[in-house]
Structure formats: C-alpha cells, structure tokens
C-alpha cells in the first residue's frame, strides 16, 4: 500500500512538473525572443503573458512553434500588466511593411471616437475611450458582408472595467 501511494505521488509530480513545465518554459523563451526582437522595454513581463496565452501550432513547413492569438484578452493583459500596446505596435509594423488586410486598430479607434461622441465624451476623454475601444474591439462579420467592429461576450465586462480604470469613464 505505501508503495502505491508513493508511486501515485511520483506520477502526479512528474505530470505536473515534467512536460507542462517544460512547455511553459519554451513558450516563455519564445515570448522573450519576440519581445527582445521588437525592442519592448518590459520583455520579461511580455514573455510571461505570452506563455500564458500561447499554444503550439504547426506551420505549413511542418515545423512547430508557439503562437499567441491577438485576442482582446491577450492584448488587454499585455497592455495592463506590461504597458505594451500590441495593437499600436502591430499597426506600426504593418505600415512599415506597406499595409495589409485584417484587423485595423486605426479603424477600430475611429469607430471608438464615434462611440465616445455618442456617449457624450469629447477631448481627452474621447481619445482615451477610443484607445481602450481599439484594444478590446474585434472585427465581426455583418449580414451585408462588410466587417464591423465590436466588443462582445466576456470582453464587455473587462472593457468597461478598463474604461473606468484608465479613463475614469463609464460605459
């Protein structure tokens, strides 16, 4: 009986400490390399948040690598914990590459300015609202085929909290 218990404890310890820990370490390392390559000041913080959100993906060439999707939650956590505005950085890199399609933080921010005006905010309050909106808004297909932006699902509560924390605004 004591042997079974010790074997069970060893098995649980191996499962918790073995591959799971190694995976987290390699995700952290991948995040650290990304942060350093992009010149982020708080590379350690970026890497920790990256590791929390990253998954292993297989690339077309058959190699595997860590990937953290640009979700509203991930972007917001990078911004609030590490002070890294990923959307602004992605827009700058996209502009440097000569454009592209997909999520446009600039468009989301313009929409945020319009929403801020509808809620009666102006000046620096509207700018803060738009900046936070651009972080949490994501492209959503519409019935007419055009891409619309919106804050949906679980992100709505976090969006409202971030508005209050960063801008002292209610939504």
Image (spheres, rainbow, N blue to C red):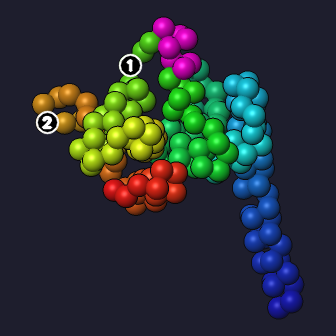
| Residue 51 visible to the viewer | no
Highlighted magenta segment, given as a residue range: 92-98
Residue of label 2: 143
Asked where in the image residue 82 lies, by quadrant, the reply is top right
Residue of label 1: 101
- Residue drawn at point x = 20 percent, y = 28 percent: 146
Q: Say left or right for 58 vs 168.
A: right
Q: How far apart are marks 2 and 1 (CA)?
A: 20 Å
Q: Say left or right for 169 vs 79.
A: left
Asked where in the image residue 102 lies, by quadrant, the reply is top left
Q: Earlier in the sequence, mark 2 or mark 1?
A: 1
Q: What element carries label 1?
A: loop
Q: Residue furthest bottom?
A: 1
Q: Say left or right for 56 vs 143.
A: right
- Residue 129 drawn at (x, y percent): 40, 44
- Residue 94 drawn at (x, y percent): 51, 17
Determine contact: label 2, label 1, CB under 8 Å. no
- Residue drawn at point x = 77 percent, y = 55 percent: 21
């Amino acid at each position: 009986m004591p042997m079974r218990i010790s074997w069970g404890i060893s098995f649980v310890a191996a499962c918790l400490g073995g591959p799971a820990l190694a995976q987290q370490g390699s995700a952290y390392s991948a995040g650290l390399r990304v942060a350093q390559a992009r010149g982020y000041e708080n590379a350690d913080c970026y890497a920790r948040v990256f590791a929390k959100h990253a998954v292993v993906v297989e690339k077309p060439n058959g190699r595997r690598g860590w990937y953290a999707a640009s979700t509203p939650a991930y972007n917001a956590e990078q911004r609030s914990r590490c002070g890294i505005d990923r959307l602004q950085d992605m827009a700058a890199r996209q502009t440097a590459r000569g454009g592209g399609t997909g999520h446009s933080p600039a468009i989301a921010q313009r929409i945020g300015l319009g929403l801020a005006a509808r809620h009666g905010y102006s000046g620096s309050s509207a700018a803060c609202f738009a900046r936070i909106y651009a972080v949490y808004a994501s492209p959503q297909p519409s019935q007419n085929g055009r891409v619309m932006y919106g804050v949906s699902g679980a992100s709505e509560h976090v969006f409202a909290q971030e508005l209050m924390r960063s801008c002292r605004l209610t939504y």
